[in-house]
Image (cartoon, grey):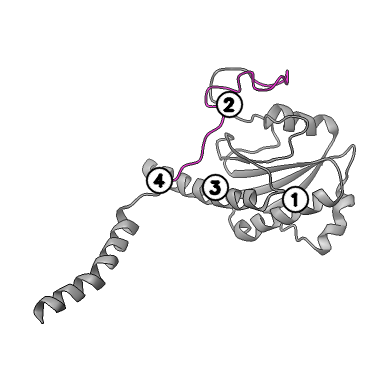
Amino acid sequence: MRKKSVFLFLLIALPVLIFLFLKFFGRNEFTIPVYYQEGVGDSLSTPCLDRSKEQYVIKDRLVKDGKINIVHFERLDGPVLKNRLEELERVQDVFYNDAEIGLTTYLNGASISTKDITDYNRRIQFKEPFWTISELDSTDWAGLKYCGTVMSNLDNRVVLVDKFNRIRGYYNIMEREETDRLILELRILKTEEENDAEAGQ
């Protein structure tokens, strides 16, 4: 009978002890890549790209450092835009209360304006300050997209940028799985930055 009691105690207590140990002494070992650690190289022929061999960071004034930025570019209205905005709204639903994360949609003012997407306000909530819509002239829009976030003309992915303005991911959010990946990697990036802050104290 005594052996049975010890066995039952271990059966109940052991999982609890393992859980508590992992919670207080374990570390999240998931990581996401840091892009262009040795520079962008010759991956794109865009002449304005910084070709130095050091860690590439976005130096455009439109992408502020000190917070996590999700950068989204659009140049045409239509069903594809609506689908992308709906996927980004899923990201917003998870993170809109987090002041350390921001989402900006940059519109190419030569072909789409802010008023063109006001109809979407009835179906999609753009919750400021988390999600802002910014209409740029075509020069600034192209400069940020091609020379800042290292994208090609046909590239329509969303870009994840950390608080040091390093690129951490590209996501084709026309695919739901890619939006899920963006949400997951935002959580990993938040944990990574929290761990770095604790280690620096």
Residue lying at 50% horizontally and 48% vertically, measured from the top left: 188
| Residue 42 lies in the magenta-colored region | yes
Whether residue 159 is in magenta: the answer is no
Circle 1 packing at 10 Å, graded few (<14), some (14-19), many (20+), is: many
| Residue corresponding to mark 3 | 185
Residue holding disc 1:
84
Q: Which residues are magenta?
A: 29-50
Q: Earlier in the sequence, mark 4 or mark 1?
A: 4
Q: Using the rendered view, name the quadrant where residue 158 is placed.
A: top right
Contact, mark 1 vs mark 2 (Cβ under 8 Å): no
Q: Residue at x 67, y 32 (%)?
A: 149
In the image, residue 54 above or below residue 107: above
Q: Residue 150 placed where, x, y %? A: 67, 29
Residue under the point 60% across and 38% down: 65
Mark 1 / mark 2, whichever is N-terminal:
2
Q: Are marks 3 and 4 in contact (CB under 8 Å)?
A: no
Query: At which x and y percent is residue 152?
Result: 73, 29
Total labels: the figure holds: 4
Spatial CA distance of label 1 from label 2 is 27 Å
Q: Amino acid at mark 1?
A: Arg
From this viewpoint, which residue is outermost toward the bottom?
1
Q: Which mark is residue 56?
A: 2
Prevailing secondary structure class for the magenta stretch in the rendered image: loop
Question: Which residue has dot 4 on it?
Answer: 29
